[in-house]
Image: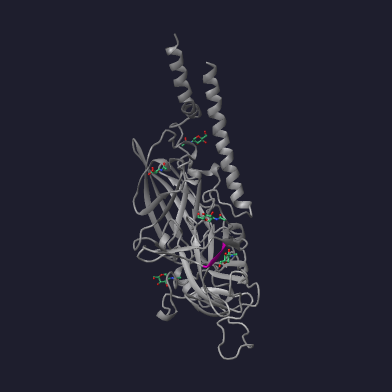
Amino acid sequence: MELFIKFNIGSFTELSCRISLLALLCVMSFSSTDAYDALDPSGNITIKWDIMSWTSDGYIATLSILNFQKYRHIEAPGWKLGWTWAKSEVIWSMLGGQTVEQGDCSKFKGDIPHCCKKKPTVVDLLPAAPYTQRMANCCRGGVLSSWVQDPANALSSFQLTVGQAGTSNKTVRAPKDFTLKTPGPGYTCGPTQFVKPSKFKTPDRRRVTQALMSWQVSCTYSQFLAQKTPTCCVSLSSFYSETIVNCPACTCGCQNKVPRPAAGTCVGSVSSYLASALAIPSKINSYTPVVHCTSHMCPIRVHWHVKQNYKEYWRVKITITNFNYKMNYTQWNLVVQHPNFNHLTETFSFNYKPIIPYGLINDTAMLWGIKYYNDWLMQAGPDGFVQSELLFRKGKSFTFDKGWAFPQRIYFNGDVCVMPPPDQYPNLPNGSSSGIASLLGLLKLPILSLLLIFFSAP
Ligand SMILES: *[C@@H]1O[C@H](CO)[C@@H](O)[C@H](O)[C@H]1NC(C)=O
Ligand SMILES: *[C@@H]1O[C@H](CO)[C@@H](O)[C@H](O)[C@H]1NC(C)=O
Ligand SMILES: *[C@@H]1O[C@H](CO)[C@@H](O)[C@H](O)[C@H]1NC(C)=O
Ligand SMILES: *[C@@H]1O[C@H](CO)[C@@H](O)[C@H](O)[C@H]1NC(C)=O
Ligand SMILES: *[C@@H]1O[C@H](CO)[C@@H](O)[C@H](O)[C@H]1NC(C)=O
């Protein structure tokens, strides 16, 4: 008997621990300036600086930007990489990228460097760049896919010919103070570190070459640094209730306030957007959204509808709506946490991959569009949405009670979507579940084992 009571207490304390841990995580993900993301703990963008050969006044280096983040990508207009030279280095020439400013090269006679700035900023070339300026993994306009969605395109490279630098591994100095913009803030880069020389496989994979010397920098993302206002919210509904829980009002801004540049501005329809399109961009930053006027003012809304109940399965419909008139979200992705993802049976028109941080709990899914079908989330308007249904097999803990059927956490393109408060979730109709019934449900297992112990006792 003692053993059973312990087990009983144990199961209840575990429950409350898990609940309070979740609450803690939610609070942390909103208030912390730390780049730590519990669902992608080692997510980072790594910059590799590989010296491939020495020249008479410096070296030729290949730079690679590797996106090791599971679900955060860099969209158009792409990355901007900056650093500070340690000495008075210049960039003689580049392949696969360019600096945004040349700077003051008036000291030079004859050959003029590509860039003489102490703090150069490099951008990728556009896909139409001439053949003579290209190299492998360049020229995608600075767009980097997420690691899970498209690892082949999660890498960007360019080549630098550096002058007025050291010409051996004893005299050369590593650049420092790296910055990565997308083009807004969000990433923080660590110090430049010496690492073992990078190795490269030849295209036929039969030979391995290596850099003469390699440095590495790691940059991590923080939503807090990126923007103070949320950009995404969640609404909920279910077949068993008429309540539709909308996104919390003013999640991403308030309509009736004078438009603030940070929160963006809103218009009533496509035609009024087009009519004002000439006027709006001149007033605000060209990347701040112009959204459809709603009570939440978010550019993105994710709607989770509990659609159907079968004997052994249940079905959810997810709809992502784009309210932003200024943006087609290419290669969008969603990360959803729900305890039933360990029994996901089918996703109908999204790709799925489980995300299992630390290899522990299989309750998080990454979902993204199918190429050429719905991997573009079109700008606000009649086509500005994507949707899919998910079919789950009911696990042991399955219930429609107490909002269990709703997700615990949703990210859109790696940014947290604001959920409605749990006390507003659609309720089961009266009668189908009284307080006593749900209590019995909770106690079912212990009571069964109590009976078992009782009857099997000698
Ligand atoms: C960056 O990500 C890679 C790949 O997941 C990992 O091996 C590396 O340790 C990470 N770096 C940091 C500083 O977290
Ligand atoms: C520099 O190169 C020499 C060989 O050419 C090597 O012995 C030495 O360890 C290298 N030093 C560094 C800091 O890489
Ligand atoms: C979005 O894509 C459509 C179709 O390619 C294009 O007509 C439209 O101009 C794009 N909108 C934006 C804001 O880029
Ligand atoms: C996680 O759950 C999914 C969906 O049921 C399943 O396909 C996958 O094998 C599970 N992975 C692990 C490591 O348990
Ligand atoms: C359900 O119960 C609540 C309070 O117990 C009551 O206010 C509500 O009217 C009931 N709804 C229906 C449909 O009976």
The location of residue 173, given as percent across then percent down, is 63, 70
Task: Please report the residue visible at 58 percent of the width from the left and 82 percent of the height from the top.
Answer: 102
Quadrant where the image shows the C terminus:
top left
Q: Which residues are magenta?
A: 212-217
410 displayed left or right of 171: left
Task: Please report the residue visible at 44 percent of the width from the left and 73 percent of the height from the top.
Answer: 139
Is residue 236 highlighted in magenta? no
Q: Residue furthest bottom?
A: 110
Relative to 365, residue 54 above or below: below
Q: Give the quarter of the image for residue 58.
A: bottom right
Q: Is residue 325 visible?
A: no
Q: Is residue 93 visible?
A: yes
Question: In front here: 178 or 298?
Answer: 178
The location of residue 453, given as percent across then percent down, is 46, 15
The image's colour scheme reads: one colour
Is residue 214 highlighted in magenta? yes
290 displayed left or right of 83: left
Relative to 435, residue 147 above or below: below
Task: Please tell me whether the stretch drawn in magenta is mainly helix, strand or loop.
Answer: strand
Q: Give the quarter of the image for residue 203.
A: bottom left
Question: In front here: 90 or 429?
Answer: 90
Task: Give the total of numbered labels.
Answer: 0
The location of residue 68, given as percent across then percent down, is 49, 58
The location of residue 9, given as percent across then percent down, is 56, 25
Relative to 161, residue 196 above or below: above
Relative to 401, residue 101 above or below: below
